Image: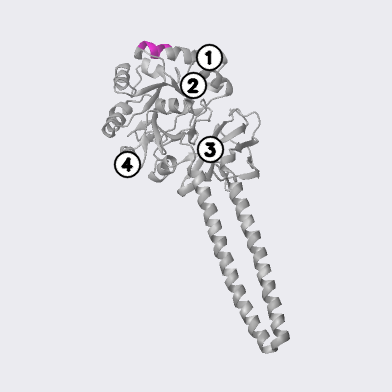
Amino acid sequence: MATELDSAEDSSASKIIFFFINLFLIGLCKQSSIFKLTNYGIIQKNQMEITCLMFNHHLLFVSLLIGFISVSFNATSLNQAKAAEKNDYATVIMYHRFGESRYPSTNVTIEQFESHLEFIRQGNYTVMPLIKIIEALKSGDEINDKTVAITIDDAYLSVYKEAWPRLQEYGYPFTIFIATDPVDNNLKNYMDWDQIRELQEGGVTIGSQTKSHPHMHRLSPIKIEQEIAISNRRFLEETGQYPMLFAYPYGEYSLDVVKAVKDAGFIAAFGQNSGVLYADDNMFELPRFAFNETYGSIDRLKLALDGKPLRVRDIIPQDMVLKNNPPSFGFTVDKSLTPINQLRCFSGEFGQLNVEILGPRAEIRLPGVLKGPRSRINCTMPAENGRWRWFGRQFLTN
């Protein structure tokens, strides 16, 4: 398969060849005009100059035409190369409440949710259980382009009464992440264990969101382990199994929290930073697109569902809990996606940020401190066919 470098070299070689052919033929034409001047006089010289001028114009047109064909061929080769990207990625979307207008920051209206489901059905999207996506990517299997998983955080009663019946109607699987204390304490507007078991029997994947839904990065290592261990025991007692998937409360975590989740036997964990997950991603820092009343438009849903991964590595800082503020934020983009001159990064506090491009490396410079307590930076880059690549990072200031 031709690479971008091969295409560029082919294009440059073609231009050089046509340049020297042009010079050679123009030289012949001028020699011919001098010969005619010597033997036939000034009138023949003018005629030959006109003939040469016409000839050169035709030659220029042919050169431009061939150059255009060469560029078009190279562009087609590039698009074909990008189109051959492995289908090892998926978009995960997340919700909390449904039809609970008192909580607009975590709620979607029923009308919004129904429009989301209908848009997914009418579009060229594949809805898969999140656990199946993770298992496929970890085993190296490909999945369909535009695959999506639906997740819901917290065991609010509106999930059971409003979301689940509509998801059943569309035949869409979903995963719910539950903190066990609100259920054990019979808090108002939360599901009970009987309802959760009913979801489980109906094919819903049950994931963990700890015992009490704390800010985990503020806890001691012992408290972190207790939050996970006690909730896992309650899941085993009430559902007959340990959860395999984990969602960080508030999307917050530190390196110590990530280690504790790994050690507890989970196979993947999710934050609340925008992005598209992929096989080589860190399986314990996976992204999700969050939706609520304010950020719940169909346009935003389409951007998320049509998204592709911005494949990065060597991310600094490694820990989202900042030791230095503002952070020196940077990452290296996978070589298959270079050049990265169209990469753009944005902050909710500062808008578009200054991005310094150093080959495949992007260094993002912030003009001031992040005020937090949670601050997000989203980076995007155009993909083919009007789609966008996403990479998001959340930082914690306290």
Residue 378 in the image, given as x and y percentages of width and height: 53, 40
Where is residue 194 drawn, in percent x and y?
29, 17
Q: Which residue is mark 1?
A: 223
Query: Tag 4: residue type?
Result: Ser
Residue type at numbered disc 1: Lys
* Residue highlighted by disc 2: 214
Question: Residue 391: which numbered mark, if any?
Answer: 3
Q: Secondary structure at mark 1?
A: helix
Q: CA distance from mark 4 to mark 1?
A: 41 Å
What are the residue bounds of the magenta stretch?
233-237
Foreground tag (4 vs 1): 4
Please rate how many residues cluster around mark 2, counting C-alpha atoms within 10 Å: few if below 14, some from 14 to 19, many from 20.
some
Q: Which residue is mark 4?
A: 115
Q: Residue at x 38, y 34 (%)?
A: 107
Q: Cβ–Cβ below 8 Å for labels 4 and 2?
A: no
Q: Amino acid at mark 3?
A: Phe
Tag 1 or tag 3, which sits nearer the N-term?
A: 1
Mark 4 falls on what kind of element?
Answer: helix
Residue 240 covered by magenta stretch = no
Given contact means CB atoms under 8 Å apart, are the residues at marks 2 and 1 in contact?
yes
Please, which residue is most extreme toward the right here? 38
The crowding category of the residue bearing disc 1, from other C-alpha atoms within 10 Å (few below 14, some 14 to 19, many at least 20), is few
Q: Earlier in the sequence, mark 2 or mark 1?
A: 2
